[in-house]
Image (cartoon, rainbow, N blue to C red):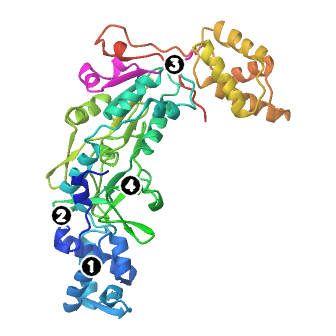
């Protein structure tokens, strides 16, 4: 069941003045839509703008009296079935509206209502069971009870730090967490919000996946029965989405964490952490971004502590928004070299994802053989261990079986023979794959120092399967 507060926020609005936004902002969006499409009926305007047909009918009735629009077609259902087009005076008003902004879409909601909706949907800690976490990680080969390090962080919904040598599945684990969250209770979000007369676009088709209407749970308190159908009684400026997952790597810049003004469209684009509200924000390859870890620390140290972020408009006005998502940092660099104790104290849980031992390496290799349809050969596997790991002192990585087998398959395809394992093919593949002198060693954080990491870490391994 949704909270009473959220139900009140989602209640359909039947009058323009109850939308909570300047009437001029609504009129500008309607003018731009009519200008772009030439003509539109009330149903079309209601669908695109996400507001009730009665509000559209109210606005169009006023404009008809002011000779800003005219009726081109009349239906059989009264004014709600009218089709409108702009008059010459209306076209002039539309051009003025285009000068102020190019935004056409669902009418924004006030920032205050957005904030209350996010808080209402994140105030209670989610309850993800051990079975759910284990199922989400079931495609990975992990040490026993590894899920006990991941599950509590997901339930707490605050922050998680994954660290360890490269190629052992940190990103794969984070992606599994993202899929797990996406199957959690969906979240109501608007496409855009407004503050100080400005529009901030939140909806991003690469991040926000709408829940199909037939998949919306019928047990929610917002439903009413109409004959044999189910219909949601909500303000259609709000849509139901899967929990968002934002994933960034080395391309992350400081600009992406601030409001970004688009000079052509004349609207603001929400920062990534605002788009991730209610879901997960993964910073992969932490420490290799275009901003330094210290800069990120300075930007997020207050939000991580308080759960509130502060954004700034070009006018200088400060906007307060919730900072409510699971933040996941993933790095193959030494954490003690990246950030200081103040940052680490604000990250609730830290998990080391280290390389496999020979037993786990064997399990991963066998599973990868099954994945690629190649017959496992014990003699070739023992040769791989002896020649390329024991003799060289090379550190095993979970990604090695996948990559070595893919190289073996490529060699077999080039030779025109069925994929197979032999010691000779293993040697040829490893010669192509490994760089001489690179043992894959990773300097682990010291056991002393802050003492935070060693107490919270746990050796682990994940199979990075493609």
Say which of 407 and 62 sits in front: 62
Which mark is first along the chain, 1 or 4? 1
Left of 94 or right of it: where is 400? right
Q: Is residue 395 above or below residue 109?
A: above
Q: According to the image, label 1 marks what residue? A: 54
Q: Is residue 221 above or below residue 389?
A: below
Find residue 258 and report its horizontal and vertical position in percent. Answer: 27, 46
Residue neighbourhood size for the residue with mark 1, other residues' Cα within 10 Å, grouped as few (<14), some (14–19), many (≥20): some
Q: CA distance from mark 4 to mark 2?
A: 37 Å
Q: According to the image, label 3 marks what residue? A: 144
Query: Residue at 57% across / 30% down in the picture?
Result: 464
Query: Residue at 54% across / 22% down in the picture?
Result: 142
Mark number for residue 219? 4
Left of 399 or right of it: where is 196? left
Query: Residue at 61% across / 36% down in the picture?
Result: 466
Q: Is residue 418 above or below residue 210?
A: above
Circle nearer the viewer, 3 or 4: 4
Q: According to the image, label 2 marks what residue? A: 197
Q: CA distance from mark 2 to mark 1?
A: 24 Å
Regarding mark 1 in the picture, which secondary structure is present there? helix
Circle nearer the viewer, 4 or 2: 4
The reply to whether residue 448 is visible in this rendering is yes
Which mark is first along the chain, 4 or 3? 3
Find residue 172 and report its horizontal and vertical position in percent. Answer: 51, 33
The reply to whether residue 199 is visible in this rendering is no
Regarding mark 3 in the picture, which secondary structure is present there? loop
Regarding mark 4 in the picture, which secondary structure is present there? loop
The answer to whether marks 2 and 1 mark residues whose Cβ atoms lie closer than 8 Å is no
Circle nearer the viewer, 3 or 2: 3
């Amino acid at each position: 069941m949704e909270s009473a507060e959220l139900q009140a926020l989602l209640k359909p609005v039947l009058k323009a003045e109850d939308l909570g936004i300047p009437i001029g902002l609504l009129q500008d969006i309607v003018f731009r839509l009519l200008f772009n499409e030439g003509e539109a009926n009330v149903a079309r305007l209601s669908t695109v703008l996400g507001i009730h047909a009665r509000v559209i009918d109210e606005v169009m009735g006023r404009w008809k009296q002011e000779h800003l629009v005219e009726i081109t077609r009349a239906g059989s259902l009264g004014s709600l079935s009218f089709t409108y087009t702009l008059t010459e005076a209306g076209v002039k008003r539309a051009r003025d509206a285009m000068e102020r902004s190019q935004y056409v879409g669902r009418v924004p909601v006030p920032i205050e209502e957005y904030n209350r909706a996010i808080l209402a949907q994140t105030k209670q800690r989610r309850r993800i069971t051990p079975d759910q976490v284990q199922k989400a990680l079931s495609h990975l080969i992990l040490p026993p009870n590894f899920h006990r390090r991941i599950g509590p962080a997901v339930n707490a919904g605050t922050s998680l730090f994954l660290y360890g040598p490269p190629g052992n599945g940190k990103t794969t684990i984070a992606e599994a967490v993202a899929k797990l969250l996406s199957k959690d209770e969906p979240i109501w979000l608007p496409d855009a919000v407004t503050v100080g007369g400005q529009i901030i676009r939140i909806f991003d088709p690469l991040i926000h996946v709408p829940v199909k209407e037939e998949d919306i749970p019928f047990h929610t308190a917002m439903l009413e029965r109409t004959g044999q159908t189910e219909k949601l009684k909500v303000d259609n400026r709000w849509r139901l989405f899967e929990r968002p997952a934002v994933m960034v790597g080395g391309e992350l810049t400081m600009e992406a964490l601030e409001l970004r003004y688009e000079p052509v469209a004349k609207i603001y684009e929400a920062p990534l952490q605002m788009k991730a509200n209610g879901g997960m924000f993964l910073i992969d390859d932490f420490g290799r971004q275009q901003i330094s870890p210290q800069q990120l620390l300075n930007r997020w140290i207050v939000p991580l502590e308080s759960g509130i972020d502060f954004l700034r408009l070009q006018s200088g006005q400060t906007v307060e928004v919730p900072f409510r998502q699971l933040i996941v940092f993933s790095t193959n660099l030494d954490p003690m070299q990246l950030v200081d104790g103040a940052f680490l104290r604000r990250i609730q849980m830290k998990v080391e994802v280290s390389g496999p031992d020979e037993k786990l390496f064997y399990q991963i290799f066998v599973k990868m053989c099954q994945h690629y349809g190649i017959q496992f050969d014990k003699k070739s596997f023992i040769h791989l261990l002896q020649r390329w790991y024991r003799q060289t002192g090379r550190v095993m990585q979970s990604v090695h079986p996948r990559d070595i087998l893919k190289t073996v398959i490529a060699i077999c395809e080039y030779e025109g023979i069925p994929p197979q394992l032999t010691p000779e093919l293993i040697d040829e593949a490893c010669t192509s794959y490994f760089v001489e002198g690179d043992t894959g060693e990773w300097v682990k954080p010291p056991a002393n120092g802050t003492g935070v990491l060693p107490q919270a870490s746990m050796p682990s391994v994940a199979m990075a399967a493609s």
